[in-house]
Image (spheres, coloured by chain):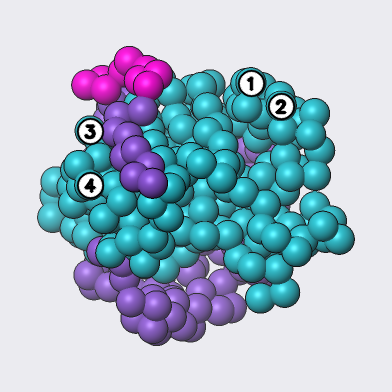
Amino acid sequence: MRPDATELGDARRRVEQLVRGMPGGDADSRSFEEPWELRAFAMAVAAYHEGHYEWSEFQLSLIESIRRWEEGEGGEPWSYYAHWLEALETVLAASGALSDSLALDERTRQVLTTPRNADHHHAHREPVAVSPATR
Amino acid sequence: MAEPTDTPLRSQEEIAARVKALEALLIEKGVMTTEAVDRMAEVYENEVGPQLGAQVVARAWTDPEFRARLLENATAACAEMGIGGLQGEDMIVVENTDTVHNAIVCTLCSCYPWPVLGLPPNWYKAPAYRARIVREPRKVLAEDFGFPIPDDVEIRIWDSSAELRYWVLPQRPAGTEDLGAFELAALVTRDSMIGVGPVKAAGA
């Protein structure tokens, strides 16, 4: 069931090669604090592997997003992966993979208004299985 | 070309929803596959969160009053340490003892106490684990995870849902009487809080 540790190590080294030298990308600001951050990170690498953009394009887009933040346009608190997401949306829009940002806004609203796991919403307060001691 | 979003100051919940929506759209358009994103996320999945759960466990091992509060109301006890969920879902911590071993599952999907444990590993979401850990827990723990539970210990499997998520308080390993909370936290593994693996031995 579990992935091979060597395989994961190799994949990780390849990704590290990619993100080395990213703007604002010291190890601390790149660490993940929320699940969405990892998901956004993984999507950017996956879309790059699929050939939707050059890594340098993504890099430039990220630099641009961080620069705008530094110039204080939005006055938002610092979030490395918010910039990462913005950069990803930008390069995907430029490549035509995400041509319609309204569709993304609409879909986001849908996600926000749909209860998570609507089919699985009540609490289970007893163990779902018990394997008794046999001696 | 579409402009990047200009929505100011999005909450974590909104941005998480946007990431989810983006992934759904891209998969529908065939830009990428879920498997490709999963594969990439797997490389790092250990880095989101389980260290928070480990801190909670270490504190419970060293502070009996905190341990009592954690077992009484895990959501509130974790909140004391600044650890909490996106939408306030409740958590229950089940405690391993000499006679009872606990493990968690979500039989229907992948509900998981991610504020303390981070992202669920892929096998947790897989149908094989979800079905078999309920049907033959002793065998799955021994054979799939190499983590045999002694015959004189009862195994209880807890089913998480969107409303209520379980996780496991493992037993403090022997020979750790002299360790402080920081060193103890380093012994706590993600798998030990799912109930499918041991904590690390002291000095290992």
> Which contiguous range is marked in magenta?
A118-126
Kindly report the secondary structure that dominates the magenta region of the rendered protein: loop
What distance separates the C-alpha of mark 4 from that of mark 1? Answer: 29 Å
Name the disc covering residue B72, or none: 1
Q: Secondary structure at mark 1?
A: helix
What residue does disc 3 label?
Answer: B108
Disc 2 vs disc 1: Cβ atoms closer than 8 Å?
yes
Residue identifier under label 4: B136
Q: Earlier in the sequence, mark 4 or mark 1?
A: 1
Sequence-wise, the earlier of marks 4 and 2 is 2
Which amino acid type is shown beneath numbered disc 1?
Glu
Q: Nearer the viewer, mark 4 or mark 2?
A: 4
Q: Chain of mark 3?
A: B
Q: Is residue A47 above or below residue B117?
A: below
Verify whether residue B181 appears in magenta: no
In the rendered structure, the residue with mark 2 lies on which chain? B
Q: Nearer the viewer, residue A71 or B96?
A: B96
Residue pointed to by mark 2: B68
Residue A91 location, x and y as percent? 35, 59
Q: Is residue B49 visible?
A: no
Q: Secondary structure at mark 3?
A: loop
Mark before the other along the chain sequence, 4 or 3: 3
Dot 4: element: loop
Judged from the image, the secondary structure of the residue bearing numbered disc 2 is helix
Question: Depth-wise, is mark 4 or mark 3 nearer the camera?
Answer: 4
Labels 3 and 2 in the same subunit: yes
Q: Residue at x 43, y 80 (%)?
A: A9
